[in-house]
Image (cartoon, helix red, strand yellow):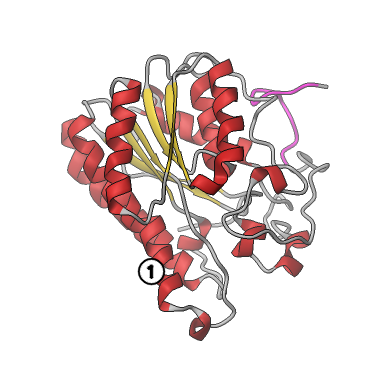
Amino acid sequence: MSRDQYTFTDPSALYSDIQPRKQHMPEPGLDADLTPRADLGEESYRGTGRLTGRKALITGGDSGIGAATAIAFAREGADVAISYLPQEEEDASRIAEILREAGATVATIPGDLRDPEYCRALVAEAVEKLGGLDVVVNNGGKQVYQESLTDITDEQFDDTFKTNVYAMFWITKAALPHLPAGSTIINTTSIQAYSPSGILVDYASTKATINAFSKGLAEQLAPKGIRVNAVAPGPIWTPLQPSDGQPKDKLPEFGKDTPLGRMGQPAELAPAYVFLASAESSYVAGETLNVNGGMPTP
């Protein structure tokens, strides 16, 4: 039976056919190589015009949560620019085609989020190709587990903060002059901001920073009519996990410690981003929306 995001269903029984397996892929990882494939909403997300006429920039829009969000935005009527690493072109091309099939104007802008000049050029190109900008989704991220703090090199620590935090700062700062009242900024944080794993110290630290950045900026920009919020995913099946985001031996149990008893799929995150981008959430600012299978947060 076909289903979409409006179908009445038992959430604990969803995606029983998608079970994570022990595997490894080199960074940054591709959806094309993920086994089993994640659900990005390709067949299930049904739009209702909630973002008609909007113009969105999504980092990490080639795979995982970013790709699911891009598909949802396009089917809700938005034009979309996606940022991704050049080596992720295979995934990006597939997602871009899905967005175009939905009728969206699409800009694909490859580059490295660790580079401030790329981040600033990314915003300028998105504005030019979309004819403006009113939604910014800072989603691209780096996660590499290490069993000990002494195993985290200066380079890894720097790369994780540049990808997850500095890029958010550079992109948001560059975007602000282009964002009219009514615009939204949505940042991706994590359950790791509240319940950090011992093997993800650097990653968890960036996610806590994103929470604070989002709440502080929300207070600053609210009087200008620009809302800033965040989404905090729990264990979601994306290429981030088998490309050194988690130990490969732990992948078969990934997400089973949540109250719902399973990992989540990117398609289950997309509606949260649509809600925060749309005018439906007009009185929501400085919020972190947790989508984590029931894991407690402060």
Quarter of the N terminus within the rendering? top right
Q: Nearer the viewer, residue 44 or 25?
A: 25
Mark count: 1
Horizontally, is 170 left or right of 204 in the view?
Answer: left
- Residue at x 58%, y 41% (from the top left corner): 63
Res. 157 visible in picture: yes
Residue 294 lies, in percent from the top left, at: 61, 50
In the rendered structure, does residue 3 fall within the stretch colored magenta?
yes
Which residues, given as a range, are shown in magenta? 2-11
In the rendered structure, does residue 7 fall within the stretch colored magenta?
yes
Q: Nearer the viewer, residue 285 or 75?
A: 75
Residue occupied by mark 1: 158
- Residue at x 28%, y 52% (from the top left corner): 116
Res. 215 visible in picture: no
Please, is residue 230 above or below residue 71 in the view? below
| Residue reaching furthest to the bottom | 150
Label 1 CA crowd tier, 10 Å (few <14, some 14–19, many 20+): some
Residue 217 lies, in percent from the top left, at: 24, 47
Q: Give the residue type at disc 1.
A: Asp
Per the image, label 1 sits on a secondary structure element best described as helix
Q: Nearer the viewer, residue 286 or 126?
A: 126
In which image quadrant can residue 127 be found? Answer: top left
- Residue at x 50%, y 38% (from the top left corner): 61
Residue 93 lies, in percent from the top left, at: 57, 32
In which image quadrant can residue 284 be found? Answer: top left
